[in-house]
Image (cartoon, grey):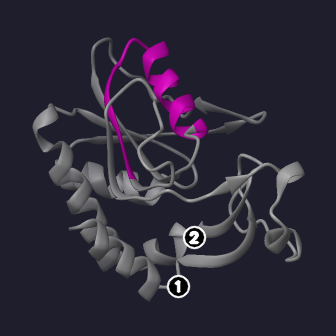
Amino acid sequence: MTHEEALSLFRQTGALLDGHFILRSGRHSRQFFQCALALQQMPLVERFGAALAAQVRGLGIETVVAPAMGGLVIGQEVARQLGCRFLFAEKENGALVMRRGFRIRPGERCLVVEDVVTQGGRALETVRIVQSQDGTVVGVAMVVDRSDGTLDLGVPLFPLIRLQVETFDASALPPDLAAVPAVKPGST
């Protein structure tokens, strides 16, 4: 799947929104990727998962780990496509943790999978969780990289869509954006 094909699917499903949005990071943007709108269609999940799995198939991945909520659907599908185990990290007292008895063996080759990254906070938290259990993170795969490739999580990145999407600090909004009421459509 090409970048253009994936972006077209986001547009077709209404998952690429235009307006004034507050991102999980607190920054503001004119565009928002509501992956849940695209990932509610299981045939699309299968296509996106297959495309991500194809990028990482040769890395010897034993386990896919995703941050909840955004990475759950696509992470599980990537694991299914790779024929490997799937785990997830979830919030506890505002931070991601591994619960439910999930354990990673020392040296276990793990791929972190996320839906959308801008600054990579949740993906980096998940990378650190894997590393704290002495797992080996071979990369981070995502459906959308909003950083245009400037993101550095210390491991290789594997995006389907890579875009430069302008983001702004709340105190430095351009006049056109400041004139539009902000919404926070994503998870918190």
Q: Which corner quadrant of the image does residue 138 belong to?
A: top left
The structure residue drawn at horizontal position 67% and vertical position 54%, both measured from the top left corner, is 167
Query: Along the horizontal axis of the image, is 111 left or right of 82?
Result: right
Badge 1 vs badge 2, beta-carbon distance below 8 Å:
yes
Q: Residues within 10 Å of mark 2 (few under 14, many from 20)?
A: many
Mark 1 or mark 2: whose residue is earlier in sequence = 1
Residue visible at 30% across and 73% down in the picture: 4
Residue 130 in picture, x, y percent from top left: 44, 23
Camera-nearest residue between 151 and 23: 151
Question: Residue at 64% of width from left, 78% of height from top?
Answer: 18
Residue at image position (62%, 58%) is 166
Dot 1: element = loop
Vertical side of 179 occupied by 164: above or below: above
Residue 104, horizontal then vertical, whole percent? 38, 22
Q: Which residue is mark 1?
A: 14
Give residue 96's position: percent from left, percent from top: 63, 33
Residue 8 is inside the magenta segment: no
Q: Which stretch appears magenta?
A: 121-142
The span from disc 1 to disc 2 (Cα, nearest Å) is: 8 Å
Residue type pointed to by label 2: Gln
Kindly tell me whether residue 146 is visible in this rendering.
yes
Tag 2's secondary structure? loop
> What is the quadrant of residue 63 in the picture?
top left
Amino acid carrying label 1: it is: Gly
Q: What count of labels does the image hold?
A: 2
Observer able to see residue 83: no
Q: Is residue 144 above or below residue 57?
A: below
Magenta span contains residue 128: yes
Which residue is identified by label 2? 34
